[in-house]
Amino acid sequence: MKLSTVRMESENVKIIKTKNNEELSNKAAELFVQALQRKKQPVIGLATGSTPERMYELLIEQYRAGKISFEQAISFNLDEYVGLSVEHPTSYHYYMEEKLFHAIDIKKENTHIPNGLAEDLEKECEAYEQKISRAGHLDFLVLGIGVNGHIGFNEPGTSFDSRTHVVTLTESTREVNSRFFEKLADVPKEAITMGLSTIMEAKEIMLLVQGDKKADILNKVIHGEVTEDIPASILQRHPNTTVITDIEI
Ligand code: F6R
């Protein structure tokens, strides 16, 4: 595993290169555990999707082995689809329950995921933002990235000043995510996501990037211009971001 530091805009983003998804997930779990143990009541931001799945399995293994506890942790998920119930198998509520929460000792009342069924979605976004702020902001945030450079569901063109908001998903994101649904038409057209400003307030960020199909976007995010056309490029301005990837860059 090689650790290199790349000079980006005014700050440094650490890059950890790994051989494969297993090594990536092990390293990610290691940084996660360090963040979990650094503070009495750590506030952790969580992503869904394929990339962090193995990391969550490894965290469950460590919990079962008695090495870690989530009893004091507070979690905030990045995003949720609009219109899916918590029992819907492709909702992010369901994902988190199935991939992590059911198997660990995190307190239900300390887990937060935007409510995509809220009657007033704008109010839901404001309330979510306030909860994050009241918790003292995120100490540690796990991010994945879309092939179009989205983080959370902040699609290309999203303002760098954005806070938790409702988004219209791009057709490309709906197509990519349709692998989790029966058919494309079932993929919701909208979602709630933490905004880019909300994300940037996290004290530490860990971006996981797996698979060659993301090589092009990762290269742009790390070596390219900081632009709202590539939402993840904002991370060049973050003072404490680590990218863990199995891509040669
Ligand atoms: C998920 C999220 C998304 C994903 C991204 C990558 O909560 O916010 O930004 O992290 O779409 O997804 P995978 O890991 O499935 O390639």
Image (spheres, grey):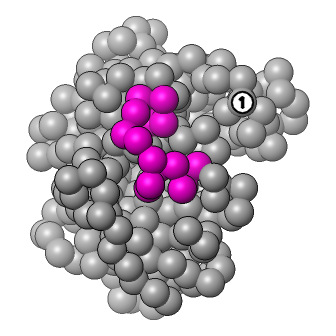
| Residue at 65% over, 18% down | 189
In this view, the residue in front, 222 or 161, is: 222
| Residue at 33% over, 74% down | 5
> As displayed, is residue 166 above or below residue 23?
above
In this view, the residue in front, 148 or 33, is: 148
Q: Is residue 192 left or right of residue 188?
A: left
Q: Which residues are magenta?
A: 217-231
Q: Is residue 18 visible?
A: yes
In the displayed image of the protein, which residue is found farthest to the top? 120
Q: Say which quarter of the image contains residue 68.
A: bottom left
> As displayed, is residue 46 above or below residue 14?
above
Q: Please state the horizontal and vertical placement of residue 242, each as a whole percent of the image.
A: 35, 66
Q: Please state the horizontal and vertical placement of residue 178, each as a whole percent of the image.
A: 78, 36
Quadrant housing the C terminus:
bottom right
In this view, the residue in front, 157 or 108, is: 157
| Residue at 62% over, 84% down | 19
Asked which secondary structure carries label 1, the reply is helix
Residue under label 1: 172
Q: Please state the horizontal and vertical placement of residue 138, each as a whole percent of the image.
A: 23, 50
Check disc 1 and give the amino acid type: Ser
Q: Say which quarter of the image contains residue 201.
A: top left
Q: Is residue 73 visible?
A: no
